[in-house]
Amino acid sequence: MTAVDELDDEARTLFALEPVAPSATLSYGDHPSQVVDLYGDPAARPVVALLHGGFWRERYDRGYLTPLAAALAADLDVCAALIEYRRVGGGGGFPATFDDLPPALAALPGAGPVVLVGHSAGGHLALWAASRCPTAVERVVGVAAVADLARAHALGLSDGAVAELLGGAERVADRLDETDPMRIPAPRAPVVLIHGEADADVPAELSRRYADAVGAHVLELPGAGHYAPVTPGTRAYETLLAVLGPA
């Protein structure tokens, strides 16, 4: 993600939306970031679990996705669960960020399978969680996902964010086998990747590379950037709604 003072018009549209308060908040640990905000009826099914982006850094939290969570709960009549997790600079990074995902998913209401949706770095975490967590996952949707960690590191995305996540540039090679969606087993659940062709933060090639490797389906959106698919009211958001609609 981009620093707030460097946002393009598309990003400003999303960040100008009023935050939406959840109907309830669950804790899955003692750390302040180990919480899940619920939108809609907790008894509604499926539960759509949302993982936010921000290149895994503490200064970016779930706040920018609260309008998306509220919109999905209303438009799809689901329970949207917006997950916070420990991030680099606030107790996260390897392995803490990854360790948060199993208990976060286990804390979701109900016992049925969940739909995992992740934006940007959250897309990376969604792909990882669908492969590694014991919670049953019905579908995975990665939006502008950092789906190829090694390639993201080679490109130096966001001034070395992958190296920060994995504990330093000298640790990246040793930890990719545990953390890179390209190297761990593919999720058993169907995977759809949505990526704007004009994304300047996470190149669409990362989604293409992942899809070529594991057989996932990619929807590339002409003219769309990094934030359009997670901004309610946009044409790109309508694409996300269609993907998340009844199978």
Image (cartoon, rainbow, N blue to C red):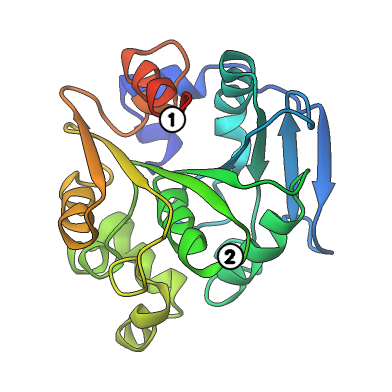
Image x and y of residue 149, in percent: 30, 66
Q: Secondary structure at mark 2?
A: loop
Residue at x 59% of width, y 56% of height: 136
Q: Nearer the viewer, residue 239 or 83?
A: 239
Residue at x 77% of width, y 44% of height: 110
Q: Is residue 46 left or right of residue 5?
A: right
User: Closer to the observer: label 1 or label 2?
Assistant: 1
Q: Specify the amino acid type for callout 1.
A: Ala
Residue 241 location, quadrant: top left
Instruction: Tell me if residue 163 comes above or below residue 25 in the rendering.
Output: below
Residue placed under numbered mark 1 in the picture? 247
Image x and y of residue 155, in percent: 18, 62
Real-space Cα separation, disc 1 to disc 2, in angstroms? 39 Å
Q: Is residue 218 left or right of residue 8?
A: left
**Label 2 packing within 10 angstroms: few (<14), some (14-19), many (20+):** few
Q: Which mark is residue 89?
A: 2
Q: Specify the amino acid type for callout 2.
A: Gly
Q: Which mark is residue 55?
A: none
Q: Earlier in the sequence, mark 1 or mark 2?
A: 2
